[in-house]
Amino acid sequence: MLRLIKWLLFLVLCLAVLAAGSVYFYVTQPQPLPAQPFAFSLKQGTSLRAAAHQLQQQGLLANERVFVMLGRALGKSGQIKAGNYELQAAASPLELLNMLTKGKIALSEISIIEGWTFGQFRAALNASPAVRHDSVALSDTEILQRIGAAEQQAEGLLFPDTYYFASGASDLALIRRAYQTMQQRLQEAWQARDPGLPLETPYQALILASIVEKETGQARDRDMVAGVFTNRLRKGMLLQTDPTVIYGMGEKFDGNLRKRDLLEDTPYNTYTRTGLPPTPIALPGLASLKAALHPAKTDALYFVGRGDGSSEFSATLDQHNRAVSKYQLGH
């Protein structure tokens, strides 16, 4: 009888060792992906059991029960992180568990394009399925208050760049990041500015940079465009730049700028008012910020498009009129 009990205990021990070995082999063996790369999402509040069931249904796990047991044995059952995940290669259940509990998520991204208006960025943000839309019902002024901005007008305050974020992040958090980045870039550029510029504040530099952004067709002309507007500001001349007029027209602009539009006085009509408009007219990039604060040393006061994106610069009105005749009128 004693010998039988010993044999039974030995058999149970062997079976336990075999079972443990099988479990160890399973949890450390990379599992083939249903597709490569393989992407999946876990919602906020997903439990270990629910995550295991979802991943087995999607073909990523062969045994959800063992996965749950593994998570509980390692004390990670309450540590599953929500988000978007992406696997580029086969992963073992143990590697997958570490990924889910450490939140190694695939980041979403959104870009702010140089020359966009604040309204255009809001539209892109509202259309993104990856963000939580906390700003949809807010006015521009309310958004500025929520992100802690001191300015009263939102235009020009966000830095154009590509921003990466975890899926489900608040759109207000993204706007705040873009605002803080612009503040940093603007202050750095302002501190390094050329001496003697006709600009009194960093905000004025931002306004000028936004005009340079909209008026520059080719990057190599950017400093010269800034030089022309700087010279005009120094001389008290009208800036006479179409993009400011168009911005001031708002929704009334139908794609055609007419003579009557240039004669209608608005705060943004630089054909009727000297100096800078009251706010930026777009979101300027770093190159335009630097150009506004390091303009080309030139005597040019005019420029006209050549039709290929580049500009012809002139120091006198006669030269400018000849350039207009050549490039715009085809004479």
Image (cartoon, rainbow, N blue to C red):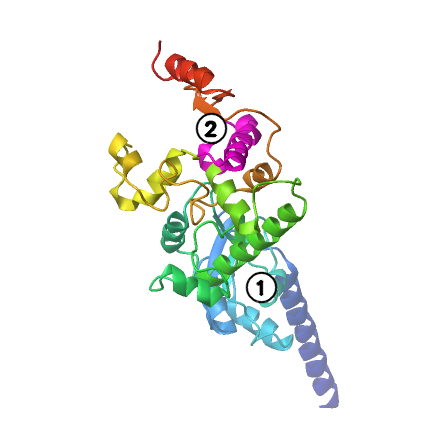
**Which three-letter amino acid code belongs to the residue tagged 2?**
Gly
Residue 267 percent location from the top left of the image: 36, 46
Q: Which mark is residue 217?
A: 2
Farthest-out residue, top: 331
Residue at image point 68% right, 44% down? 192
Q: Is residue 36 visible?
A: no
Name the quadrant containing residue 25. bottom right
Image coordinates of residue 174 in percent, x first then y, are 49, 58
Please tell me the numbered disc located at residue 103: 1
Kindly state the secondary structure of the residue where label 2 is placed: loop
Residue 321 locus on image (x, y percent): 40, 17
Q: How crowded is mark 2: few (under 14 residues within 10 Å), some or many (20 or more)?
A: some
The part of the chain drawn in magenta is: 212-237
- The amino acid on which the numbered mark 1 sits, given as a three-letter code, is Gly
Q: Is mark 1 on a helix, strand or loop?
A: loop
Depth check, front residue: 219 or 328: 328
Q: Is the magenta stretch mostly helix, strand or loop?
A: helix
Q: Can you say whether 279 is above or below 212 in the image? A: below
**Is residue 235 on the magenta stretch?**
yes
Residue 79 x %, y %: 57, 73
Check the image and report above or below for 108 versus 219: below
- Given residues 275 and 157, the one toward you in this image is 275
- Magenta segment includes 19: no
Cα distance, mark 1 to mark 2? Answer: 43 Å
* Residue 303 shows in this picture: yes
Q: Which of marks 1 and 2 is in front?
A: 2
- Please tell me whether residue 135 is drawn above or below residue 71 in the rendered image: above
Rendered-image quadrant of the C terminus = top left
Quadrant (top left/top right/bottom left/bottom right) for the N terminus? bottom right
Task: Identify the residue at horizontal 50%, vertical 33% (top origin).
Answer: 232
